[in-house]
Amino acid sequence: MAFDGPSDREFSRKAMKAELLDAETERELAYAWRDRRDEAALHRLITAYMRLAISMAAKFRRYGAPMNELIQEASLGLMKAADKFDPDRGVRFSTYAVWWIKASVQDYVMRNWSMVRTGSTSSQKSLFFNMRRVQAKIEREALARGETLDGHQLREMIAHEVGVPLHDVEMMEGRLAGIDYSLDATQSTDEDGRAWIDLLEDDAPQAAQTVARDHDSAQLRDWLIDAICTLNPRERFILRERKLREDPRTLESLGQELNLSKERVRQLEAAAFVKMRKALESRSREVQQLLA
């Protein structure tokens, strides 16, 4: 097992020297954490099984991630397992923790494999971590039979073996084979030294769109102000408290303040909306007439 530096090796040595828990002690520690939130018991449980986390993290070293970061992710998985472990089920903690540790490390590897998200579904994870192994197995078996498989046949057999759709295999094959390039890199075929980023289309709003949008927003704001001005003071107050506050008030609280029933406040609110709608519709007809 290779480590990134002295600190990793020292951490590993300490973990390997931790106590080995028997089933009864393990169960008592689990109960102490679950029932009394005893942090000392949790620390002892996690420390005892840190060697398991380190061992599982090392299995993912071939994916190019730093060992210390893999250990950190494995430790997070171990802590999640300890927090969710139910000793009443009669299962050893190590058996339960394996799944959480593996899931945590796998998620980290997939997140950091590429700037492009590799996938998060169970089928995508299965492909990511098993595709190369399954492909090698199929190729060995075909070679033993004296067969030669083309790319499409190989992908179909991988999909059948892993139990995923063919398009998932094709997508994952491209992602595993791809390499991340910097957008600031110069195009090798461009004599002017232009970078790849220069070819990206700017999807930001153009100047004409921005001006038109700002004009429309200002016009709509003016129309709304005019529509609100058609309301009487009580209707404007109800509208403001019901629709313009970050924390809208209830009909009941407004009724108590205005000495009205909740139903009467609702009626006034509805009447205010009718007035505003008529004012806005009038503005709309004016615009249509101007454009005709």
Image (cartoon, rainbow, N blue to C red):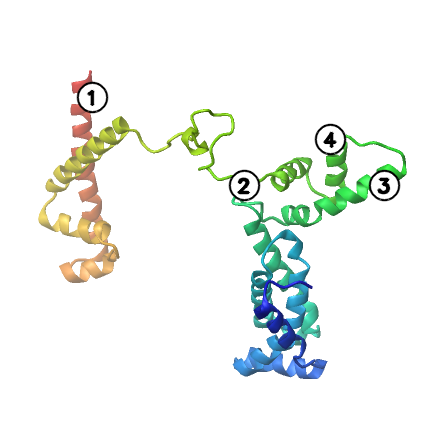
- Residue drawn at x 86%, y 37% is 143
Closer to the chain start, of discs 4 and 1, is: 4
Q: Is residue 262 above or below residue 168?
A: below
User: Which amino acid, mark 4?
Assistant: His
Closer to the chain start, of discs 2 and 4, is: 4
Residue denoted by label 4: 152
- Number of marks drawn: 4
- The answer to whether marks 1 and 3 mark residues whose Cβ atoms lie closer than 8 Å is no
Q: On the rendered image, what quadrant is the C terminus found in? A: top left
Q: Nearer the viewer, mark 1 or mark 3?
A: 3
Disc 1 crowd, CA 10 A, few/some/many (<14, 14-19, 20+): few
The CA span between labels 2 and 4 is 25 Å
Disc 3 crowd, CA 10 A, few/some/many (<14, 14-19, 20+): few
The CA span between labels 2 and 3 is 33 Å
At mark 3, the secondary structure is helix
User: Which amino acid, mark 2?
Assistant: Asp
Q: Quadrant of residue 203?
A: top left
- Residue drawn at x 61%, y 76% is 47
The CA span between labels 1 and 2 is 53 Å
Residue denoted by label 1: 288
Residue denoted by label 3: 141
The answer, for residue 150, to whether it is visible in the render is yes
Q: Nearer the viewer, mark 2 or mark 4?
A: 2
User: Which amino acid, mark 1?
Assistant: Gln
Q: Tell me, for residue 166, which label it has, or none.
A: none
The answer, for residue 259, to whether it is visible in the render is no
- The answer to whether marks 2 and 3 mark residues whose Cβ atoms lie closer than 8 Å is no
